Image: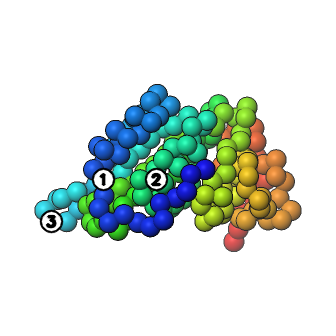
Amino acid sequence: MKPRCPEYVKVSMDPEQVIECIRDKFGDSVREIELRDYKGGVAGNVAYRNLWLSVDRERFTDLVDALGEIDFLHFHITSGDDIGSSVQLNYHFSLFRCAGRGNRLGITLTVDVPKSDLVMPSLWERIPGIEYSEREIREMLGVDFDGLPNKALIFLPEDWNEDIKPWRRDETGPKPEDIRELS
């Protein structure tokens, strides 16, 4: 693991430069690169940009480290979805937080984790604040995070059957008898 950028940069890179840097370092390991603009205000200027990237699981931590060399990588949340034979994870970050309106760049890294091997490397050593997000994904979708020190449940009751994954749509998802009505 390479050291993180010690502080935020004051001048942002153009998103196209970030894309070029990623393509140079990662080639075909990063797929489906899409830059989305979000406009706001009366003039309809670009207020925020988000870069969506799909990356191979084997290169995921390398890409996180590379983004951390560009600027301090600010973690937001991890979201996930059962997409059939895989669980798709979306890691939401941002770069250039000190560069001002219209210069910040959201980064969403998408990784498909096959259900036959539901293990991802934990980012806990790099980003300690990711712990609760990884624990949530673990208990709700069944993805184990290699290197995450605390894997205790945080949302489900202590007596929950951990073979049942509430956000899954397959046989590990909840059955009608597992669901109770709340008043």
Residue type marked 1: Met
Residue 112 seen by the camera: no
Q: Do the residues labelled 2 and 3 touch (CB within 8 Å)?
A: no
Which circle marks residue 156 in the picture? none
Sequence-earlier tag: 1 or 3: 1
**Which residue position holds label 1?**
13
Sequence-earlier tag: 1 or 2: 1
**Which residue position holds label 3?**
42
Q: Which residue is drawn at 35% across and 55% down?
A: 105
Q: Do the residues labelled 1 and 3 touch (CB within 8 Å)?
A: no
Q: State the residue in front, 146 or 42.
A: 146
Q: Is mark 3 on a helix, strand or loop?
A: loop
**Which residue position holds label 2?**
69
Badge 2: few (under 14), some or many (20 or more) residues near its Cα, within 10 Å? some
Q: Which quadrant of the figure has residue 84?
A: top right
Residue 65 in the figure: left or right of residue 22? right
Q: Where is residue 114 in the image (x, y as percent from the top left)?
A: 66, 33
Residue type marked 2: Glu
CA separation in Å, label 1 and label 3: 26 Å
Q: Which residue is drawn at 44% across and 41% down?
A: 53
Residue type marked 3: Val
Compared to residue 26, the image places residue 157 above or below, namely below
Q: Residue at x 73, y 56 (%)?
A: 148
Q: Which of marks 2 and 3 is in front?
A: 2
Q: Which colour style is shown?
A: rainbow
Compared to residue 63, the image places residue 23 above or below, namely above
Sequence-earlier tag: 2 or 3: 3
